[in-house]
Amino acid sequence: MRITGDLPEPLLQTLKQLAAERKVTFSIEIEAALRGHWSEKPVVDTTSFRLYTVGGRLVSPDMDLDRTSALLVAGDEDEFRERE
């Protein structure tokens, strides 16, 4: 298949030079470059992060954390207590 496109002159010269050095056609060099680019794995951000914890000071030890309704009630009770 033939396609038409524009490449920057330095890139074009580099591709031609690589093709000549490897003794392959210009088309094969472009195909190899595209396949190589597409086969690369995407870069994953591995920036570390710091996890801040509260050390268990905010939750009563007798509270069942599986019951979200109990958490909501406790939050409301705390809020109303602060208003008094």
Image (cartoon, helix red, strand yellow):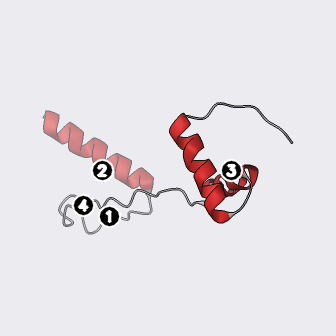
9 up-or-down from 68: above or below = above
Q: In the displayed structure, does residue 23 sit left or right of residue 66?
A: right
Disc assigned to residue 74: 2
Residue, disc 1: 63
10 Å crowding of disc 2: few (<14), some (14-19), many (20+): some
Q: Position of residue 44 (x, y in %)?
A: 46, 58
Residue, disc 3: 30
Q: Quadrant of the C terminus?
A: top left
Using the image as rendered, state which of residue 60 and residue 43 is in the foreground. 43
Q: Amino acid at mark 4?
A: Arg
Q: In the displayed structure, does residue 13 sit left or right of residue 29?
A: left
Q: Residue at x 29, y 68 (%)?
A: 62
Q: Residue at x 22, y 37 (%)?
A: 80
Q: Position of residue 78 (x, y in %)?
A: 22, 45
Identify the mark nearer the N-term, 1 or 3. Answer: 3
Whether residue 36 can be seen here: no
9 up-or-down from 42: above or below = above
Q: Amino acid at mark 2?
A: Ala
Mark 1 vs mark 3: give the one in front: 3
